[in-house]
Amino acid sequence: RPCKQPACLANATDGVRLAARIVDTPCNEMNTDTFLEEINKVGKELGIIPTIIRDEELKTRGFGGIYGVGKAALHPPALAVLSHTPDGATQTIAWVGKGIVYDTGGLSIKGKTTMPGMKRDCGGAAAVLGAFRAAIKQGFKDNLHAVFCLAENSVGPNATRPDDIHLLYSGKTVEINNTDAEGRLVLADGVSYACKDLGADIILDMATLTGAQGIATGKYHAAVLTNSAEWEAACVKAGRKCGDLVHPLVYCPELHFSEFTSAVADMKNSVADRDNSPSSCAGLFIASHIGFDWPGVWVHLDIAAPVHAGERATGFGVALLLALFGRASEDPLLNLVSPLGCEVDVEEGDVGRDSKRRRLV
């Protein structure tokens, strides 16, 4: 008699397929407005009304990164958030996805051989959407926010120029020296929003960020950069358990962040030396907009290469997020594959928030 597939596996599979479908769909069909429809669809299914900040409102509210990248496109940029806030939550988690629906490179335009395939530059946001849907359907015990940074990096009269300076949501200024280093700009606004407005304790951003990721960790392993050695180990362990493999990058802001030195702004958006661990540096740019002294956990996952196998999307990242945060799930199978430890015992009368957190082994 055929065994019925557990709901967890069915929901995970649906999440992977959702992510892969979005990544495979070309930009003439999957533009920023269509991506918002996908987010609204998931929200309606889960009974969640998304927060959407779009077009000129991004500019007036200070999201200079997302707005600056997407303002030249026919379909305007947007920041969208799906929020799950259950009773009894002990921590707040934010998953921030890079959703560049197409990346021409902007005025620092890509070549005819490197531009094809750039419909896949929304792979991080697609994985976050698929994983969020599956995680909530399986029951998620902590506050979980899915943050989508959506833009089309296009060319036009209103496009950002190299030499332009943008004020990002973090309050920091960025001198643009490469419009093709756009993912870090939208994610900088996303993680800053997660920190300032959502009060996240754990911020994980997922992105098809750098071509150098495939050189650093190969076609099959995502690259992880994080301010926590424990979470670095947890990502590797979760990857081995779920099949979305992960390998660490060098985390050394004190030696690498000087690559972004600017004479006229807080930083440039692209490195001075492309031979100096560029994937690490790209991640550090994002972290700088939370602050290197931020006491929470920040995890950056660069999935540029494993987001596709040949000409088709893989749905990479969905299983990884489900496994990594499985301990916060009500599902026993996700609990089993999670690298997170059991909940710490809380002494009666102890109301300290930290003591109630689910901790890593």
Image (spheres, rainbow, N blue to C red):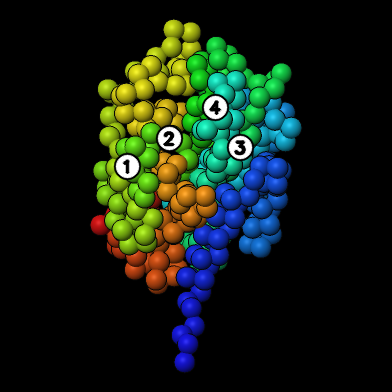
- The residue labelled by disc 1 is 217
Disc 1 on helix, strand or loop?
helix
Q: Quick check: can you spot residue 204?
A: no
> Crowding near pointer 1: few (<14 within 10 Å), some, many (20+)?
many
- The residue labelled by disc 2 is 211
Which residue is at the front of the view, 278 or 104? 104
- The residue labelled by disc 4 is 110
- As drawn, the label of residue 225 is none
Disc 2 on helix, strand or loop?
loop
The earlier-in-sequence mark between 1 and 3 is 3
Q: Are marks 2 and 1 in contact (CB under 8 Å)?
A: no
Give me the C-alpha separation between circle 2 and circle 1: 11 Å
Disc 4 on helix, strand or loop?
loop
> Crowding near pointer 2: few (<14 within 10 Å), some, many (20+)?
some
Decide if residue 251 is on the left or right side of residue 157: left
Name the residue at the bottom extreme.
1
Give me the C-alpha separation between circle 1 and circle 3: 24 Å
The earlier-in-sequence mark between 2 and 4 is 4
The earlier-in-sequence mark between 4 and 1 is 4
For badge 1, the amino acid type reads Thr
- As drawn, the label of residue 102 is 3
